[in-house]
């Protein structure tokens, strides 16, 4: 896809939640679900809040468009532009899914098992992000930006390969968890998995950086 066509697709994905809310707004009750607890309780709020949620997607798109221009290493984005666009599209699709789930439950309460749908969507999102993470080049906004990864390209690459494997494995594990485990158990897997997948590469980046410094110091 060309840059122009990619931008058009991202804009359409960003505006899709707004269009969905606009199409359904007249049929919505005055109070709609805004939060689902792990114990099954649902919190309701005024339906006007849906506009704020729908507008998150255009706001996120504008921010993601701006960040590469602000990055001191902006030149590296050209080396993983397709990957970056894929990240943007995946996040927008996830927000679109959440919007659709909220609207369905507002119009037909009890139609969906919200916890399971969200867990499945998160699993797909994390697996996709994990698959793409090794392609991300050094920058200040996306990926594992530790002092050690930002100081050494080799440490950056090794860390993101490891992080990609962990996040892909977590995403793949969340799919069956969302299908077969109770919602509270699936949330426990999600929380523990995100902590492990986020912190392990940080620790590894320090270890690999120290190993490289020690090795270079012995030369």
Image: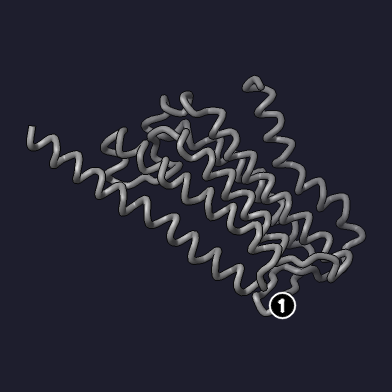
Secondary structure at numbered mark 1: loop
Q: How is the image coloured?
A: one colour
Compare residues 4 and 147 and report the one nearer the observer. 147
For the point 41% across and 45% down, which residue is it? 162
For the point 75% across and 55% down, which residue is it? 99
Q: Horizontally, is 195 left or right of 3 in the view?
A: left
Pinpoint residue 136: horizontal percent, then vertical percent: 45, 35
Pinpoint residue 148: horizontal percent, then vertical percent: 27, 44
| The N terminus: image quadrant | top right
Compare residues 85 and 183 and report the one nearer the observer. 183
Q: Residue furthest top?
A: 2
For the point 28% across and 45% down, which residue is it? 147
For the point 65% across and 20% down, which residue is it? 2
Give the residue at mark 1: 40
Pinpoint residue 9: horizontal percent, then vertical percent: 71, 32
Q: Horizontally, is 12 left or right of 71 in the view?
A: right
Crowding at dot 1, Cα within 10 Å, few <14 / some 14-19 / many 20+, comes out as few
Quadrant assignment, res 143: top left
């Amino acid at each position: 896809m060309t840059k122009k066509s990619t931008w058009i697709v991202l804009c359409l994905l960003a505006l899709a939640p707004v269009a969905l809310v606009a199409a359904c707004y007249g049929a919505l009750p005055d109070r709609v679900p805004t939060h689902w607890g792990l114990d099954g309780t649902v919190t309701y709020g005024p339906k006007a809040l849906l506009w704020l949620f729908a507008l998150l997607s255009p706001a996120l798109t504008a921010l993601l468009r701006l960040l590469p221009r602000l990055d001191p290493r902006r030149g590296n984005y050209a080396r993983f532009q397709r990957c970056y666009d894929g990240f943007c599209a995946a996040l927008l699709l996830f927000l679109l899914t959440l919007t659709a789930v909220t609207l369905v439950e507002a119009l037909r309460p009890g139609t969906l098992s919200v916890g399971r749908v969200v867990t499945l969507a998160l699993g797909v999102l994390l697996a996709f992000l994990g698959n793409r993470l090794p392609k991300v080049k050094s920058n200040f906004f996306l990926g594992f930006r530790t002092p050690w990864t930002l100081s050494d390209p080799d440490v950056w690459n090794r860390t993101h390969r490891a992080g990609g494997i962990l996040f892909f494995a977590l995403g793949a594990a969340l799919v069956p968890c969302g299908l077969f485990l109770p919602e509270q158990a699936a949330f426990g897997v999600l929380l523990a998995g995100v902590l492990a997948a986020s912190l392990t590469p940080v620790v590894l980046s320090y270890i690999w950086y120290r190993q490289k410094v020690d090795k270079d110091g012995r030369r």
